[in-house]
Amino acid sequence: MKRFPWRSARPRTCLSTPRITRSLDIDRIAAAIRPNTRLVTINFPHNPTGASLPLDRYTALIELCRKHGIYILHDEIFNGLGQTGTQHLPFVADVYERGLSLNVMSKSYGLPGLRIGWIACQDSAILFKMERLKHYLSICNSGPSERLTMIALRNRARILARNCASVDENLTKWDAFFAAYPDLFDWRRPDGSCMAFPRYKGVDGVEEFCAPLVEESGVLFLPSTIYSSEFSETPTERFRLGFGRTKLDEGLAALEAHLNRNS
Ligand SMILES: Cc1ncc(COP(=O)(O)O)c(C=O)c1O
């Protein structure tokens, strides 16, 4: 078995300097539409970058898709999670007749063990087809999980406030951490979610940084090279960090000790 399985497991298609657009380019989507285009899929706040979409671009995307009769599948699983006071986009199923809102209990609500997710849509014919397909995949959901999900969703505001408070607390700690290592990292707070995508500036490269970090010190960052794709350029010098949990201090201490040992 390879020591660092991600190193050569995936093709590295991004050989040029990556260009990170901070937002979705609607003109490029318009140019990519073909007569047989049926669906556009998006994910905001985005995993792994934590980026969101300005409302005017979201509206422009919906208008574009409406004009062409295209469905939008929006993976909205981080909607509601971010710094306290973050303005989140409206759920696509609420604002677009061909919008498919994908959500789960595992992310913003912090209840992954329930294993419950859903798709909302105004188009009942589509929902009917999806329901038929789901019956091929599993016999049913867990009844207790559905009941617990209903209880959680009725208390949505309280749960999200608690989880956003964890994000607030953890972001403050990450701000302080990155301020101490300006030569090693570029840090920018994400727009939403509980993850960020900082740049690693060390000459050894992000894979050489991440692999010993998890193997020697038990701190897992995902190097951006694992997100390489045949469809578009992806950055080669960033890493994803998650900060949705409490008890960040232990991980930060292990990270600092690792950096000090290897400085
Ligand atoms: C953007 C995104 N969508 C969907 C999922 C799936 O969530 P679950 O593991 O609850 O099925 C994930 C999980 O990481 C995710 O990051």
Image (cartoon, rainbow, N blue to C red):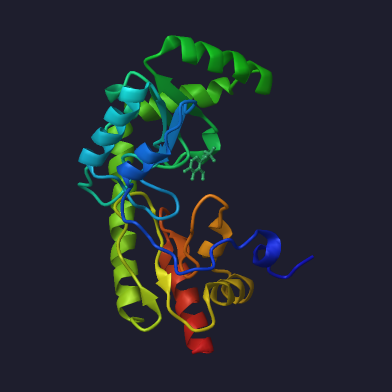
| 5 vs 51: above or below | below
Q: Is residue 214 visible?
A: yes
Residue at image location 27% in from the left, 37% down from the top = 58
Q: Position of residue 114 (x, y in %)?
A: 53, 33
Residue at image location 30% in from the left, 77% down from the top = 179
Judge from the rendering whether residue 157 lies leftward or rightward of residue 194; answer left or right: left
Q: Position of residue 188 (x, y in %)?
A: 30, 65
Q: Nearer the viewer, residue 198 or 142?
A: 198
Q: Nearer the viewer, residue 71 or 242?
A: 71
Which residue is situated farthest in the right direction here? 1
Q: Is residue 88 visible?
A: no
| 181 vs 106: above or below | below
Total tally of numbered discs in the picture: 0
| 104 vs 254: above or below | above
Q: Nearer the viewer, residue 235 or 215?
A: 235
| 14 vs 114: above or below | below
**The quadrant where residue 64 appears:** top left
Q: Position of residue 100 (x, y in %)?
A: 41, 25
Q: Nearer the viewer, residue 46 or 62?
A: 62
Judge from the rendering whether residue 27 lies leftward or rightward of residue 239; answer left or right: left
Residue at image location 50% in from the left, 75% down from the top = 254
Residue at image location 52% in from the left, 81% down from the top = 258
**The quadrant where residue 256 appears:** bottom left
**The quadrant where residue 174 appears:** bottom left
Q: Quadrant of the N terminus?
A: bottom right
Q: Position of residue 122 (x, y in %)?
A: 37, 15
